[in-house]
Amino acid sequence: MSKGAPWIAALRVGVPPLRGLLPLFGLLALWQIINPHGSPYFPPPSAWWVGLAGLAKNGRLLTALSATLTTFILAIVFACLIGGLLGLLIGRSRAARRALGPLLEFCRGLPPPVIVPVGVLLLGYVQSLKLVIVVLVAVWPILLNTASSTAGLSDLLVEVSHTMRLGRFATLAKIVVPSAVPAFLVGVRGAIPLAIIITLLVEMLTSLPGIGSLIVISQRQFHSAEVYGLLVVVGLIGFAINGLFVAIEGVLLSRFPPRASYMQGN
Amino acid sequence: MRRESFNLPGAVTFIAAIAIWELAVRSGAVSFDYLPAPSAIALAFVGIVRSGELFTATLHTLRSILIGWVLACLIGGVLGVVFGLSGFARRWFLASLEVLRPLPAIAFLPVALLLFNFSLTTELVVMVYASIWPMFINTMGGIANVASRLHDVSLTLKLTPLQSLAKVLLPAAGPAILVGARLCLGTTLVLAIIAEMIGNPHGLGYAVVSALLAIQPEQMFAYVLFIGVLAIALNACLLLVARRLLPVYGREAMSDV
C-alpha cells in the first residue's frame, strides 16, 4: 500500500482515474470548435479567458477574490472555535442538552439562506455583516456534531479518567477533546460548502465587494463571457478548499482516529 | 433510538427565550433599529395568512421543491446506478463529475439567469444541479457496496440483469439511497429559497427579500420563522415515510448522518 505523509494519503483516497477528466475536456473543446465566435449566451471557453483577463487587468478580480476568501476563511475559523467550544460545553452537560435541545433543533432546521435577510435587517449593510452571517450559518453543523459526540462519550472512558485521577482539565484535554475530533471534522465538512454558498449569497444580495457581487454585476450587464469565467473561478475555489480540507482532515484523523467504542458505550 | 419523554426543560427554555426577546424589545434594552417583538411577528403572521400571501408563496415553493426533488432524485439515482454498476463509467467519466461536484451551485444562478431570465426554469436548474450530488454519491456507494454474495444469488437464480437490479441490488442499496433522497430534499429546499431570493421572484424566498426591501421587519420575521417550521415538517414527513418503507433498515439509515 502507498505510504507517505497522512495528508498525501488522504488526498489519494477515492480519487478516480484522471483519464476520467477527458470527457469534460472533450466537451469544452467541442464547445470551442462548434462556436468559435460565440453566441451571446454560450461564449466559447477562449472568450471566458478573455473576459477574466479583462477583469484581472483592472484589479477587480483580485480585490473580489481576496474579499471572498478572507470572509470565508475567517468565518470557518470562528465557526470552528465557537462551535467546537460550545459543542463541548453542551455535550458535557446533560441538563444543558435537555434545556437547549428544542432551541438548537429549530436553529439547525432553519434553512441557512434565510439568516441573510435577518442579518441585513439587524446589522445594516456594513462590512462585518458578511462575516457575522457566515459564522452564524457555519457554526451549527460543527456545534451539533461536537455536542452529540461529546454526549455519547463512553462511560468506560470517563471511568478511565477517574481511575487515573485526572483533573477536570486533563480529562478534557486527554480524553474528551481527542474523542470528539472525528465528529467535529464531520461538522466542518458539512459547514464548508454552506459557508461558501452563503458568502456568495450575501455578496449577491447586498453588493458588498466579492466574487458574488462581481458575477451578478457581469450578469446584469450581459457580459456572458465574464459570467462563465467567474463560474470557473468559483469552481476552482470550491475544488481547492475541498482538497485543502481533505488534507487537513487526513492529518488530524491520523492523530485522533475515530473509535467505534467511543460512540457506542452508553 | 429510544423515544424520550416530554422534554419539559427544553420547552420551558424555548418559551423563556421568546419571553426574554419580547421583554428586551419592549423595554428597549436591545438597540437594534428593526428588531420586532414576537407578539408583533405573530400579528404580522396572522396578516399574511389572512391576505393569502403566505399560502400563494408556500404553494409556489413547495411545488418547485417537489419538481426539483423528483428530478434530482431521478437523475442522481440513475447516474448513481450506472456508475455503481459499471467500472468502465467510473474509470472514464467519474473524474469529470468529481471536478464539477464541489462547484457551489449558487454560482450557476447568474448563468441560469442569463439563459432563462427570471423564471421557474432558472430556479429548477440551480436546485437540480445542487441536489443531484447527494443522491448520486449515496446511490453509487450503495450499489457498489452490495455484497458479492448477493451477486452470486442473482447468478444462481439466473436473474436477468434487470431482474437482479430490481430484486437484489436496489433493495440492498435501499437504505443508502434513502439517505441520499433525504439529503437531497434538504439541499433542494435551501437552493429553492436562494433561487427565489435572486433568480425567480416568487415563493417564500422572494417574500422574505421583498419584506426586507419594503422594511417590514415583522412580516419578514414571520416568513423566516415559518420557513423554519416548514423545513422541519418536511424532514419529519420524510423520516416517517422512510420508516414505513424500510421498517428494518429505516431506523438505522435515517438516524443522523
Image: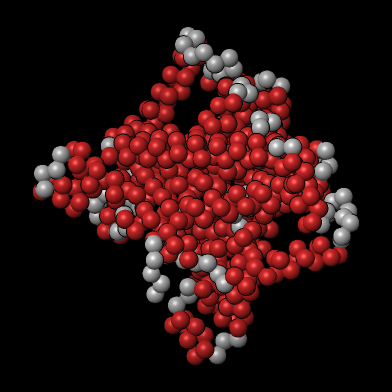
Q: Residue at x 50, y 9 (%)?
A: B28
Q: Is residue B91 above or below residue A190?
A: below
Residue farthest to the front? A57
Q: Is residue B241 above or below residue A25?
A: above
Front residue of this view, candidates A154 and B102:
B102
Residue A122 lies in quadrant: top right
Q: Residue at x 38, y 50 (%)?
A: A183
Front residue of this view, candidates B172 and A158:
A158
Residue A123 lies in quadrant: top right
Front residue of this view, candidates B202 and A218:
A218
Query: Quick check: A265 left or right of A113?
Result: left
Q: Give the x, y percent position of residue A39.
A: 88, 53
Q: Give the x, y percent position of residue A148.
A: 35, 46
Query: Quick check: A78 left or right of A203?
Result: left
Residue farthest to the top? B27
Front residue of this view, candidates A60 and B196:
A60
Q: Give the x, y percent position of residue B106.
A: 66, 45
Query: Quick check: B100 left or right of A89?
Result: right
